[in-house]
Image (tube, rainbow, N blue to C red):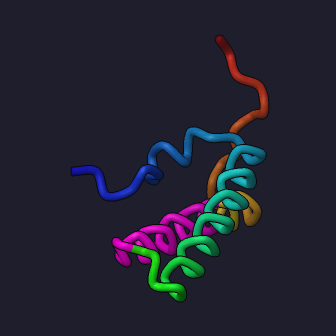
Amino acid sequence: MKRSEYSAHDLRERTDKELLSVERQLKDDLFKLRLERATNQLENVAKVKTAKRDLARVKTLITARTKGFEPSKPDYREE
């Protein structure tokens, strides 16, 4: 069973722009999940924990690339 749709290996293959897009999407998803939990509409509360971990994984990779610990991927892709 796959716990998260964003694995570290998959995230490392993305460009910086894609990572920023994923970060925005995860922030939106986390907000919606927290809102659903507060209004007792969320069935699976473990989704909040998974979303927080995914967001932390993305932010860690962005920070590592910014500081030069992780090489950045070029914005173009060879097809």
The residue under the point 28% across, 51% down is 2
The residue under the point 64% across, 75% down is 31
Q: Where does the image place residue 30, in percent across and percent down from the top left?
A: 58, 72
Q: Quadrant of residue 4?
A: bottom left
User: Left of 13 or right of it: where is 3?
Assistant: left
Q: Main secondary structure of the magenta part?
A: helix
Front one among 16 and 70: 16
**Magenta segment boundaries in residue numbering:** 43-61
- Asked if residue 52 lies in the magenta stretch, the reply is yes
User: How many marks overall?
Assistant: 0
The residue under the point 54% across, 73% down is 33
Q: Residue furthest bottom?
A: 38
Q: Residue furthest top?
A: 79
Q: Where does the image place residue 62, in percent across and percent down from the top left?
A: 68, 61
Residue 52 position (above or below residue 29): below
Quadrant for the C terminus in the image: top right
Q: Where does the image place residue 32, in percent across and percent down from the top left?
A: 61, 71
- Asked if residue 50 lies in the magenta stretch, the reply is yes
Residue 41 position (above or below residue 28): below
Front one among 34 and 67: 34
The residue under the point 53% across, 85% down is 39
Q: Quadrant of residue 63?
A: bottom right
Front one among 41 and 48: 41
Residue 15 position (above or below residue 58): above
Front one among 13 and 71: 13
Q: Where does the image place residue 50, in percent across and percent down from the top left?
A: 42, 69
User: Left of 37 or right of it: where is 43?
Assistant: left
